[in-house]
Amino acid sequence: MQDSPLSADAKAGRPLLSLSALTPDELEFVAGLAWEFGRDPGRFAGLLAGARVGLLFTAPSTRTRTSFWSAATTLGCHTIHFGPGDIQVSTGETWFDTGSVFATYLDAVVARTNGPQA
């Protein structure tokens, strides 16, 4: 694996909400890692062993859900899936509350939403 050009705040867990948040060097590095992962996933096996990752989908997506789960599993992560019926914002729980719980108990959240309002 190549040396990381990621900034200190990125390494410290800066939320990545859009690829536009990355510098050109960071984007090139992440794309390179993705390419390497696709070519030889076994090289990355267990790299994040024990990490807890939430997979959040506000709309059904078979391909994306499967690929996220597969990558997280290859990396050694424990995953939990959240679909539209699992998030309780319609019953009065706010997205802020949900985010606080995620931040407390999960190491990462991978989300596929229909936009910022989701």
Image (tube, rainbow, N blue to C red):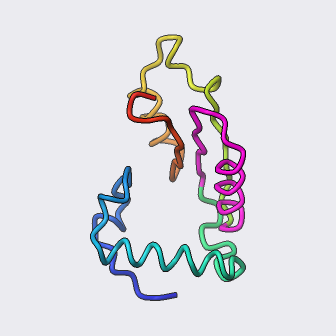
Residue 66 lies, with reference to residue 33, above or below; the image says: above
- The quarter holding residue 82 reads top right
**Residue plotted at (69% across, 54% down):** 69
In terms of depth relative to the viewer, which is nearer, 99 or 31? 31
Q: Residue furthest top?
A: 91
**Residue plotted at (43% across, 35% down):** 115
Residue 10 lies, with reference to residue 88, above or below; the image says: below
Q: Residue furthest bottom?
A: 2
* Magenta span of residues: 52-75
In terms of depth relative to the viewer, which is nearer, 104 or 6? 6
Compared across the picture, whether 3 is left or right of 54 comes to: left
Q: Position of residue 73 (x, y in %)?
A: 71, 61
Compared across the picture, whether 19 is left or right of 65 comes to: left
- The quarter holding residue 81 reads top right
Report how many numbered discs are placed on residues in the image.
Answer: 0
Q: Position of residue 89 (x, y in %)?
A: 50, 19
**Residue plotted at (72% across, 79% down):** 42
**Residue plotted at (67% across, 72% down):** 46
Is 8 one of the magenta-colored residues?
no
Q: Position of residue 62 (x, y in %)?
A: 72, 45
